């Protein structure tokens, strides 16, 4: 018995049928993902070459059932668990009940590379009747980024990490210097989206594993603590500003050596460093210092290390670290001019 017939048997007609079918769609999607059932997912979509799926990633626009299947297979390959919990679902339909649409909000829990993540998620879909069943003709499923700066249309990866850390508030006191300060180091790969497209998913994942290994090994060597890793970015914390800058310099040198060996897969790292007081100003540390470090890292180009005035002041007496000329810059979302310096490492 078709969905339309079943709903009609329950006394629902016309728009009520369409809206009930649309209302059920997010939950059916969640159930199919929980079962990791690609066939059940595909069965939710219209049998048309024009069916469309749009996700969060820059390459996640799929048209046609073959591309849909590829997307679902990739999702399952990259995450051991995908669970949706929709807390708000709305649906409506056209006056003729020929088409309906739904909008849902909730959370998605996944396990990626052994790391559990939980992020907000939004789902919208246009639903049409297709051979007696209500199916999706167009869908948009995305994870909104809370790290988006005021006045900016799009967030950076580093801002997303900074916002996640602000919400999680990890205990930083064990990684503070005797004076109560913590030095924050952010890393990011320049033009990573282009690299992903050039290398393909599998090639990019192999390069990313190598990148992660280099950063984690040098962080341990210089006494750094991995606060957060997301995508191709890292946030590290150090109890010593000097050791943080020495780690940053060695990271750049390590990637320079690596790039000489594999010139067809060049990775250029941008690094930003800032020191803030984590003991007496805990709220300000997470609310201001972490985002300040992320914004400084956003200033850095591939191959550069950009540091705040305080991080420079704590290390300028060391003969093994050299700095460029002072720059006064505006950082988006933060008032006033900020003094930053490039570390001269090459």
Image (tube, rainbow, N blue to C red):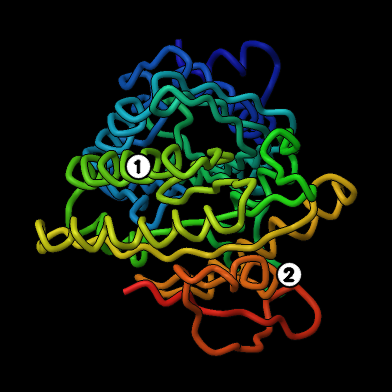
Task: Answer few, some or many: residues within 10 Å of disc 2's Cα (few below 14, many 20 plus, some between 14 and 19).
Answer: few
Residue assigned mark 1: 212
Along the viewing direction, whichever of 90 and 2 lies nearer the viewer: 90
Work out whether residue 286 can be spotted.
Answer: no
Which residue is found at the position 25% from the left and 36% from the top?
70
Residue assigned mark 2: 150
Q: Position of residue 3 (x, y in %)?
A: 51, 18
Task: Answer few, some or many: residues within 10 Å of disc 1's Cα (few below 14, many 20 plus, some between 14 and 19).
Answer: some
Mark nearer the viewer, 1 or 2: 1
In what quadrant of the picture does the N terminus appear? Answer: top left
Q: Quadrant of residue 220?
A: top left
Work out whether residue 256 can be spotted.
Answer: yes
Q: Helix or strand or loop: what does disc 2 sit on?
A: loop
On screen, residue 16 versus residue 220, left or right, reads right
Which residue is found at the position 26% from the left and 54% from the top?
196
Which residue is found at the position 55% from the left and 38% from the top?
225
Q: Position of residue 337 (x, y in %)?
A: 74, 85
User: Residue 292 shows which numbered tag?
Assistant: none
Q: Is residue 133 above or below residue 51?
A: above
In what quadrant of the picture does the C terminus appear? Answer: bottom left
On screen, residue 191 versus residue 20, left or right, reads left
């Amino acid at each position: 018995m078709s969905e339309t017939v079943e709903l009609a048997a329950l006394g629902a007609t016309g728009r009520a049928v369409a809206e009930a079918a649309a209302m059920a769609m997010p939950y059916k999607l969640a159930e199919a993902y929980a079962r990791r059932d690609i066939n059940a997912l595909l069965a939710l979509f219209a049998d048309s070459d024009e069916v469309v799926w749009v996700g969060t990633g820059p390459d996640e626009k799929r048209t046609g059932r073959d591309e849909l299947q590829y997307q679902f297979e990739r999702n399952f390959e990259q995450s051991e668990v995908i669970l949706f919990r929709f807390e708000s679902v709305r649906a409506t339909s056209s006056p003729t009940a020929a088409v309906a649409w739904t909008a849902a909000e909730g959370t998605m829990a996944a396990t990626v590379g052994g790391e559990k993540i939980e992020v907000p998620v939004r789902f919208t879909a246009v639903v049409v009747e297709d051979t007696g069943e209500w199916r999706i003709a167009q869908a948009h499923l995305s994870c909104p980024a809370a790290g988006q700066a005021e006045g900016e249309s799009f967030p950076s990866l580093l801002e997303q990490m900074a916002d996640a850390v602000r919400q999680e508030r990890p205990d930083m006191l064990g990684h503070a210097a005797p004076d109560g300060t913590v030095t924050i180091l952010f890393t990011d790969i320049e033009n990573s989206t282009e690299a992903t497209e050039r290398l393909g998913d599998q090639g990019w994942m192999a390069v990313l594993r190598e990148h992660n290994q280099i950063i984690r090994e040098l962080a341990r060597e210089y006494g750094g603590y991995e606060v957060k890793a997301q995508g191709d970015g890292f946030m590290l914390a150090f109890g010593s500003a000097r050791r943080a800058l020495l780690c940053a310099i060695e990271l750049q040198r390590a990637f320079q050596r690596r790039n000489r060996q594999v010139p067809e897969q060049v990775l250029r790292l941008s690094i930003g460093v800032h020191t803030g007081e984590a003991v007496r100003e805990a709220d300000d540390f997470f609310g201001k210092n972490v985002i300040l470090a992320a914004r400084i890292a956003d200033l850095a180009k591939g191959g550069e290390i950009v540091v705040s005035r305080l991080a420079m002041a704590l290390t300028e007496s060391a003969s093994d670290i050299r700095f460029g000329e002072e720059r006064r810059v505006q950082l988006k979302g933060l008032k006033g001019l900020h003094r930053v310096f490039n570390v001269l490492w090459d």
